[in-house]
Image (cartoon, coloured by chain):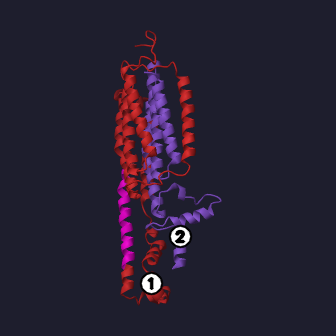
Amino acid sequence: MSLAEAPQGFLSPTGVEIAFLLVGLVTFGAALVTVTTRQLVHAALWLVVALGGLAVEYLLLTAEFIAWVQVLIYVGSVVVLLLFGLMLTKAPIGRSPDADSGNRWAALTVAVASAAALIWVVVDAFRATWIDLDGPAAGSTEVTGTSLFQNWVLPFEALSVLLLAALVGAIVLSRKAKTDSSSPPVNSRVATKSSPGITESHGNSLSSSSGRNGRTGRHEGNARNEQDGRGGRGGRDDRDGPAEQEGAR
Amino acid sequence: MHLAYPAVLSALLFCTGLYGVLARRNAILILMSVELMLNAVNLNLVAFDVWLSKTAEETLHSGQALTLFTIAIAAAEIGIGLAIVLAVHRNRGTADIDRLRDTAEGHESQEGSAADGSDTDAPATGAAAEKAEATA
């Protein structure tokens, strides 16, 4: 159906338009739940629905290759990474009442105002513009590959350098420096938490340097607590490593 | 298909992500909202590329190539962002954006109270550690 022969209108939507509208409603609803829910893990799971809906929209726009890349990278890896991040930062499983900050009404005002402005401008600008979806697909793998490796080779290669830099950067950031693992806050924190009575009764021996040699059994238990705390921290850092490597990949 | 459908959906998704970035408090939820905004831009790029590839004779498919680049850069961004968030959580014990006010001007009193409030089992900030030593 070319532009010249048949005038299209809002009152007679085609099947593709109806499907686009329905999937778009699902996508928008999932995005709204993502940014408003108070359960952090549910936000990540609703993000899967929103991103999958966008993949279906790409399919309806005949951009097949982008749709599968969307499914592979966003739904497959980015959401998994976000879930890893939620777990590693010990996000609460149930409802967390402080998920939204205090300026949510200002944020809502800004978002609604910008949405109104953007929709008004876009609808006014493209009121009489139609996408011709018939004919060969505009985004099949063959077409995308041809254009990517004929015209976009240099940015493509630069992108691989960027991915390598991101991989190295993520590994460096998630590695823990050797000096930090025996930092004073860990030791002082354990000592203050577990032994208020010890510091009162043996205050002089703790402050003096000779107190470390003449420790009682309770002090040895205290030292073992310190080592356990440090070992637990080391274990958690080891778990950080593979997630970040996967993310950089 | 009318071009307004993908354009309006893209605008709505972008503003949803904007609300999330402004209103959320957890850093990982803010990263999710950033992903929503990036996806809105991707939808716009794909829709306009499909429109222009049928209208123009010779096309570079720049919209779809840019979409692929955006997806790759977003994957790199989420990896680096999560690494930063995890490093902050390891050092501060919180991923709360509102409590990371060390470089803010004129908020010293609030920052001190926030350091007292962030009393989790992870190592506290330097100020809290000094206070703990002073009380011990």
Residue A2 location (% of width, % of height): 42, 13
Residues at marks 2 and 1 touching, judged by CB atoms closer than 8 Å: no
Circles 2 and 1 on the same subunit: no
In the image, what residue occupies the spot 43% across and 80% down? A195
Magenta segment boundaries in residue numbering: A224-246
Q: Main secondary structure of the magenta part?
A: helix
> Which amino acid is tagged 2?
Ala
Question: For this view, does A99 lie left or right of residue A58?
Answer: right
Q: Is residue A176 above or below residue B30?
A: below
> What whole-number distance in Å separates the C-alpha atoms at marks 2 and 1?
21 Å
Q: Which residue is mark 2?
A: B128
> Which amino acid is tagged 1?
Gly
| Colour chain A appears in | red
In the image, what residue occupies the spot 45% across and 45% down? A36
In the image, what residue occupies the spot 44% across and 84% down? A197
Q: Which residue is mark 1?
A: A197
